[in-house]
Each structure stands twice: as structure tokens, then as C-alpha cells.
Image (cartoon, rainbow, N blue to C red):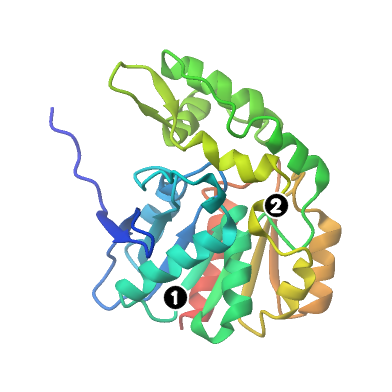
Amino acid sequence: MTEAKPSYTDRFHETDDGLRIHARDYAGPEGAPTVVCLHGLTRNAADFETLCEHLRDRHRLLAIEQRGRGRSDRDLDPSHYEVGRYVQDTLGMLDALAIDRPVLIGTSMGGLMSMLMLAAAPDRYRGAVINDIGPVVEAIGLARIAGYVGKGVPVANWVEAAAAIRASNGDAFPDYDEAAWIAFARRLYRERDDGMLELDYDPAIAEPFHAGQAGGVPPDLWAVFDAMGTTPLLVIRGALSDILSAATVAEMQRRRPDLESVEIPRVGHAPMLDEPEALAAIERFLARVLA
């Protein structure tokens, strides 16, 4: 039985310091507007598989893997694993592909990247979807992430991989069954030459995080938020999130009355964007900003 051909093209871009970063490029119809997907701290382009498949008949989607993740090169200097460097790499790839005025969809760390990109040049983007992150990042959620990032060990099979993912994410997805956890694990793990499975990121990405460098994030994210101008925004929050509080979303809404928001029931950090409520909100938002 032949393996199904992927619905995307692999793109590679050489950064200004000589690393190659990878992206999945779902071409969409000719001339379609581009949506750029930016993943979270320990994730990769596979996080957006369902969303991209759902939208690719109407839009071009580019799911970029930051250095140290997926098929992007690992960096020998862990201090480069920080948000400002990821933004620089992303902008370089967008320029190389001549992508003009995309919509950004950023999950967690990717949402922080989106905020910084909009604050620096709000007119460069048609809009942004910020998934389960905001100007206040809750300490309890950061402590949970610190408990597992960079500490994964190889496992022998997909059942063990699913169990490991469930151990660190079970509270965020209480309705997942075994099949859902295995599907989740297949997005996060890769198979090594010896048949063992390992998480698909460089464990060294955790070094700046554990060193208290905040991954290069500015100390006052409200100043960043306020600098984002009037670029249309959709904020998605998991109702069980320990990273983005309802109070923070309310303050974002107070500062930006035009901001759209949606809360995904029975999901924590971070919604996978394959939930019906998330898909419907993103579709409405894209239809409005790309009209």
C-alpha cells in the first residue's frame, strides 16, 4: 500500500547565522492570501495539521518550525533559543518567500511571537489569532511547563509516548481517549534510527527557560500589546487554561474593544485549533479580515 502524498510542500530557509529552518507550505488556490502558523515552545508544524487541511481550499498556509524543532536545524548555542531570534528567523523566511501582509496564527510561544511582530510593524499584517497567551502569563502554568520541558526520555512505542504526553497534558484535555492521546503523541515524537521514539525538539531549548531568561520576552507585555495598533485580533482561550486567565482576556478586551475572543470549553493550554468552536471562530475572523 503506497503512502498518501502529503498535501503540503516542504520549504527550507537559511537564516542569517547559517541554520536551515523548515516549514510546511499548503499552497491553496492560486493567489490565495497567506496564513502563517507559529507553534508553541515544544511543538512543531504538525500541531496545525487539522487546521491547515481544513483551510487549504481557501487559503495558503505556511506552518513554520522554529530552530531546534521538527525538521529545522538544531542550534549549537542554546542562548539562541529565544523569542526574538525566532521572530528574526520567521521574518527572514517571509521575506525570502515574498509573503506580503499575511494573517498570523500563533499558539502560546507563537502567540508571543505574533504580538512582538505586530508591535514592531502592525501594518505588515492583516490580522492575528493569538491562541491561549496574553500580556500576563500565569505563574502556575509556567511552573507546569518548567516541570517537563527538556526532560523527556526516549520511549519504546506509541502507547508509551501517549502515556508520557498524557502525564504532562492530561488536565488540559480531560475528554481525550487513548486514540486521541496516541494521535497527539504522533505529532510530538519522531522515530529514531534504532526504533526508539523521542520528542521532536532539541532538549537544549529549555536552557534559557530554566535560566530565568524568560526566553527573550520583554518584561512589560502590556506595552507590547498596546503597541500592536489596530490590527484585527482574535484571542482564543482554553476554558481550563493555566497560562491565559479570563481576567487577562477581559483587560485585553477593555484596551481593545474591537478585539474578538472565544473560549473553548473543556480544554486547557493550549487549544489544538481543531475544536469546532475554534475552527468556526477562525473561519469567521479570516472571512472578515481577508474580505
Task: State whether residue 211 appears in this view.
Answer: yes
Local SS, label 1? loop
Local SS, label 2? helix
Say few, some or many: other residues with alpha carbon within 10 Å of mark 1 (under 14 / 14 to 19 / 20 or more): many
In the picture, the quarter occupied by the N terminus is top left
Say what amino acid the circle numbered 1 marks.
Pro
Residue under label 2, please give it: 214
Residue 2 relative to residue 12: left or right = left
Percent from the top left, x then y, of residue 271?
61, 47
Residue at left 77%, top 80%?
257
Residue under label 1, please give it: 102
Query: Disc number at residue 144?
Result: none
Q: CA distance from mark 2 to mark 1?
A: 27 Å
Task: State whether residue 107 appears in this view.
Answer: no
Say what amino acid the circle numbered 2 marks.
Ala
Residue at the farthest top position: 156
Nearer the camera: disc 2 or disc 1 = 2
